[in-house]
Amino acid sequence: MNTKTEKPSTAQNLNGDVGKKLALMADFGRVYTIVHNGQIMAPVHATMTLYEGLGHIYKQKGWDQDAQQKVDKYLITASGYKHLNKVASISLVTPQSVIVDGRPVPNPHIERNPRTKAIESVNIRRMGIGYSPTGNIVVIDKTLFYNVYTYFIQAIQAKMKRVEWKTENNKRVKTENKEFPDCAIYGIESEKPTRAGSWAFFATEPPLGIWVNYEDQATIDCLEEHTQRQRFGDRMAGTIVDRNILKDHPAIAAAQVFTKVGEGGTKASVDVYGYRADNSPRDISSIMRQAESGSDTKDFEIRAETITDVSPEEEQVAREEVAGDEKSENMGDPAKDQEPPPGFWKKQEGEKGGK
């Protein structure tokens, strides 16, 4: 890490001793720490920079009902939280079991279609163990139930709700016209739609469901996303739950960010707190076991939650991140690379011979 120091200022360390505040300029941001009697103290405060171009943040579009206008906000991706965790140093661990239907089962618990072997649901429990800004150990314990079918239905419903926008007086105005009017309609299984198209029924709350026109391009897009969920459902569930753990841990505790445009494109700054930990892997395992058993302890704080609602935008970003990672991992794979064009190797030999 290339660093340079700024002029130190007087500050207090956690013991109340007067020391010097030292700023270290690193490639990933400005890191603050305390120097006392010539020794760098354990607490660390860093100002980290996140870039939209690097996939650290993403824009979520919204609608303000009161102001009747679009409201956009920037949120942090799982990749962005991993970047922030370089300072926070929160250990992400997987307990041995997760509760499914009232009983403990191996974690994660993945249900697959018996015929296609595609993923249908994932139950996963993860923990984030790290220090708060005051030096206390905090355990964030989260469980997520990721149902592939549910997200497919939500994707179809999102397409059904989307409306067209038009420009009036140099302003974007929301209309009542549907952007994808022929992609799907609500109904019951016994009454097939009479309008043109090829239709398939998917139950939501019996006897109601959605008739999907699988000839419509919007539906085809949803089916492609559905295939990605079936392939990467376990990795997507892990990405979502890890993002929520890092978002809620007090060492980071940031969700929405304010952006500015400058060198490197759209970027945002986030304050992150770290602590030079003396915990060995054995200590972390002990903390995880105590938290998993639910035993009371005064040594650390436990914040447990079951994630019941994941926004379509968050799920989409997680899916795109996992799909992007998969694409990167497959680059340069001899089993998947295409053969070079005819004459390629002969041309290569000719160029070598001419040198």
Image (tube, rainbow, N blue to C red):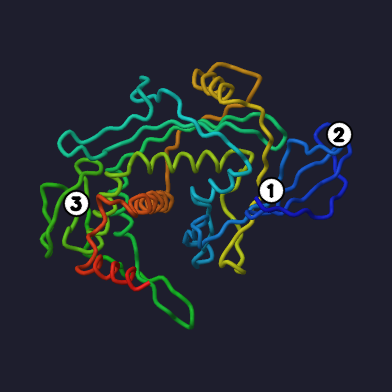
In the rendered image, the vertical position of residue 218 relative to residue 134, given as above or below? below
Mark sitting earlier along the chain (3/2): 2
Q: Position of residue 152 (x, y in %)?
A: 28, 48
Which image quadrant for residue 287?
A: top right
Amino acid type shown at disc 1: Ala
Residue carrying label 1: 46
Quadrant the C terminus occupies: bottom left
Q: How many residues crowd mark 3 within 10 Å: few (<14), some (14–19), many (20+)? A: some
Mark 1: give few (<14), some (14-19) or many (20+) Cα within 10 Å.
Answer: many
Compute the Cα span from label 2 to label 1: 21 Å
Q: CA distance from mark 3 to mark 2?
A: 68 Å
Tag 2: amino acid? Gly
Residue that label 3 marks = 187
Q: Position of residue 157 (x, y in %)?
A: 30, 54
* SS under mark 2: loop
Residue at 80 percent across and 48 percent down: it is 22
Q: Residue at x 77, y 51 (%)?
A: 23
When the figure is inspected, residue 54 is found, relative to residue 1, above or below; the finding is below
Please name the amino acid that badge 3 sits on. Gly
Q: Is residue 197 left or right of residue 104?
A: left
Q: For residue 147, what is the image quadrant?
A: top left
SS type, badge 1: strand
Label 3: state its secondary structure: strand
Q: Position of residue 73 (x, y in %)?
A: 53, 59
Viewer-side label of 3, 2:
2
Image point (39%, 72%), residue name: 165
Going by the image, does 85 lie left or right of 47? Answer: left
The mark lying in front, picked from 1 and 3, is 1
Residue highlighted by disc 2: 16
